[in-house]
Image (cartoon, coloured by chain):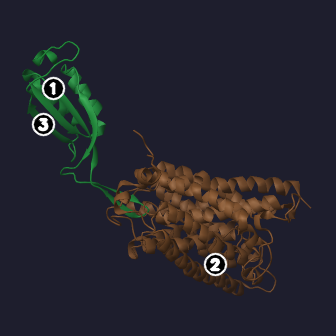
Amino acid sequence: MIDAGDTAWLITATALVLFMTLPGLALFYGGLVRAENVLSVLMQCFTIACLMSVLWLIAGYSLTFSGDGPWIGDLKKVLLLGVPRDAVSGSIPESVFFMFQMTFAIITPALMVGAFVERMRFGAVVLFCSLWLFLVYVPVAHWVWGGGWLAERGVMDFAGGLVVHLTAGVSALLLAIVLGPRMGFPRDVRPPHAPWMTMTGACMLWVGWFGFNAGSALSAGADAGMAMLVTHISAATATLVWIVIESVKFGKPSLIGAVTGAIAGLASITPASGYVGPGGALVIGLVGGAVCYLMVIVVKHRFGIDDSLDVLAVHGIGGALGITLTAVFAAAALGGVGLAEGQTMGSQAIVQLTGIVAVLIWSVVVSFLIIKVVQALLGLRVSAEVEEQGLDLNVHGERGYNM
Amino acid sequence: MKYIIAVIQPNRLDAVRDALSGIGVQGLTVSEVRGFGRQKGQTEIYRGAEYTMQYVPKVKLELAVDEPIVDSVVAAIREGALTGRIGDGKVFVLPLEGAMRVRTGEMGADAL
């Protein structure tokens, strides 16, 4: 039975999640690169959004959500053939469910843009993301949300800590390692060209995240309402954590730090958002903000890896942290919805950690193979000359700022 | 005639202009430039990473003046640009061989 209220909310939520990528994430990343590369970032996000949409229709949706094999779905809904106009998924039209899930399949590969900005070939971006959708995103989404083996074990990932943030974060880090750092990294890399643009994009991401998390309730009731509440509280708390850390450490709280904190808080609450209460959200925001801050320093400065816009540190770590803390704060005693019957905090934590390890290994191995294939077919990196002059003019034939 | 080039802090431009207007200077050319001197660069911090700006934003003034007022122009620039901190800038005075006002064709000091 189609419920009008649920359908109206899910259509709205779908629009909000698409808005996260176009233009939210694009602007968030665009402001962080140098002026000669701003268009390349916007163009990569825009292209990924369109390409993933078509691939999702062709086979992505079917392989994720049709059939309940442990590893991968089937091909019965390729091109949505055989899915009638009035098909129902839960209490909403299947067309709406398809669209809502599609926006997740769009933003997840787009998140990885942050790792390879300012130096990757456009064709390589396109091919990598296409293969990655089918070989990493689709299987993992099926395991967790499509009735696969992790779902069978009762893994709790409400809106994509494993499916979205961990897959993207880990694969992005790997790509950054194989691709190598930007010219001049770490000493002579140019700073973000437009922090205001990054803030604008972060705000769109924040608002869009209400659709991402509260929409994942797939209904317009108490679960959606509480998901929105905890999402907001976690984001606000993590922002304050970054502001305090930077104030103490440098004496100057930066805008870019503050908005990065917000995204860390949002990524951290994502898997927990349907299961925890306001108290859990406060703690997840606090821990998520602090740990993600630390990981930015560790990845860039300790390991010397140019994950340029900190995809692993903010998304991968935030997502994994949220998955872990879900086992704790989902407990009814701590204000959550309660764990499934027969599960204790400890046994649920083991399920959650199993999910993290499995998704981590899958993402690393498969992404590595994809990267090698793309490298062999197209080459990953633009020439040093192009990199120095910027991708906008050389790859796209345009300038971000004609002044 | 002398050609005077001054590189100053951007936020002192209005004060310099006021000081120059006060002694009757009729016009000058301004451009936004970047450079470094003893001030070296500035440090900016994004997500915990320090970026050293090798070149600091400055404003460059250029004006051509007749001999009698050269010293007072240099003094006025100093008056307007001075904060006493590193990075206040420099003033250079160059000999100027000729000048022409395009509209009228006047030459030399008359063109200034």
- Mark 2, other Cα within 10 Å: few <14 / some 14–19 / many ≥20: many
Relative to the observer, which residue lies in front, A368 or A24? A368
Q: Position of residue A204 (x, y in %)?
A: 61, 52
Residue A257 visible somewhere in the drawing: yes
Q: CA distance from mark 3 to mark 1?
A: 12 Å
State which mark lies toward you, 2 or 1.
1
Q: Quadrant of the N terminus of chain A?
A: bottom right
Relative to the observer, which residue lies in front, B51 or A26? A26
Residue A287 visible somewhere in the drawing: no
Q: Position of residue A244 (x, y in %)?
A: 48, 62
Judge from the rendering whether residue A386 lies leftward or rightward of residue A155; answer left or right: left
Q: Which mark is residue B92?
A: 3
Chain of the residue where label 1 is placed in the rendered structure: B
Q: CA distance from mark 2 to mark 3?
A: 65 Å
Residue designated by label 2 = A324
Point 74% across, 67% down: residue? A61
Residue designated by label 1 = B64
